[in-house]
Image: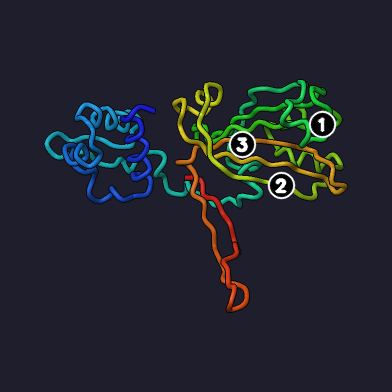
Amino acid sequence: MPRYHQIYLILRQQIASGIFDQTGLPPELKLVDQYKVARVTMRRALSELVKEGLVYRRAGHGTFVNKEHASRAPGLARTWRLADNLVEDTGETAIRLIEYGMLPCPAEVAPLLEVPPLQGVLRIVRVRSREGRPVSCVTMYSPPELAPLLTPQAITQTSVLALLERGGVRISQADQSISSCLADAQVAPLLDEPMGAALLSVMRLVRDGEGRPVQWLRGLYRPHYYDHHMVLARAGEDSARIWIPRDITTAVR
């Protein structure tokens, strides 16, 4: 990733946290010294922030945060429980269907869905947007017998799990992992991110009441639109006390 873009991402994160709201960004020369880059590199990073509308410049005074930007709108942040709605919420988002159809199951997904490699499964790719901004891209696979429950029209209006449950599938449990990855050539334009940008990655395998896999998905999220919050409680005996999560939420900025 170009150095100017790295600095741009760092400054954008700091702007989102509110630390420059009162003072404005440090002077350009101070930023040059802080990040140990050429002045032209810093100007490019600041230009990206101006282009996005996050900051504005006043000649002779400096660079200031645009508090009227859509990302700072009151009420935009909303708490979502990570285990449920980070992937499935449809209440305040718009869904664009990118791919839909029966395709051979990828070799890495087949064992998880417990189907033979290359067997036809339903593949769905959706991009979710909030106030006109793409925030996530979710790719999912389901066994072919569930396809009649997941029509193209329905999955742009209702969560996939809700559709499965309406169709008589009793959702019981899910295995989920959270990590990070880099935006590749396919997902970068869908999320309006440069190739190589860091993304939050959530992988989930959902099972029904009989333990059968009904859905495998990978959700990719623009991390600067999410805040992950965890409340921890102290538990255990005095000799082996540990922290355990009591409440986990994710806020969408």
Q: Distance from label 2 to label 3 (Cα)?
A: 14 Å
Counting residues from the start of the chain, the first of labels 3 and 1 encountered is: 1
* Mark 3, residue position: 219
Q: Amino acid at mark 1?
A: Pro
Q: Amino acid at mark 3?
A: Gly
Counting residues from the start of the chain, the first of labels 2 and 3 encountered is: 2
Q: Residue at x 34, y 45 (%)?
A: 14
Q: Position of residue 162 (x, y in %)?
A: 75, 42
Instruction: Say which quadrant the N terminus sits in.
Output: top left
Q: Nearer the viewer, residue 152 or 204?
A: 204
Q: Position of residue 60 (x, y in %)?
A: 11, 36
Q: Is residue 198 visible?
A: yes
* Mark 1, residue position: 143
- Characterize the local packing of mark 3: few (<14), some (14-19) or many (20 or more) Cα atoms within 10 angstroms: many
Asked if residue 177 lies left or right of residue 105, the reply is left
- Characterize the local packing of mark 1: few (<14), some (14-19) or many (20 or more) Cα atoms within 10 angstroms: many
Q: Residue at x 25, y 28 (%)?
A: 41
Q: Amino acid at mark 2?
A: Asp
* Mark 2, residue position: 175
Q: Distance from label 3 to label 1 (Cα)?
A: 18 Å
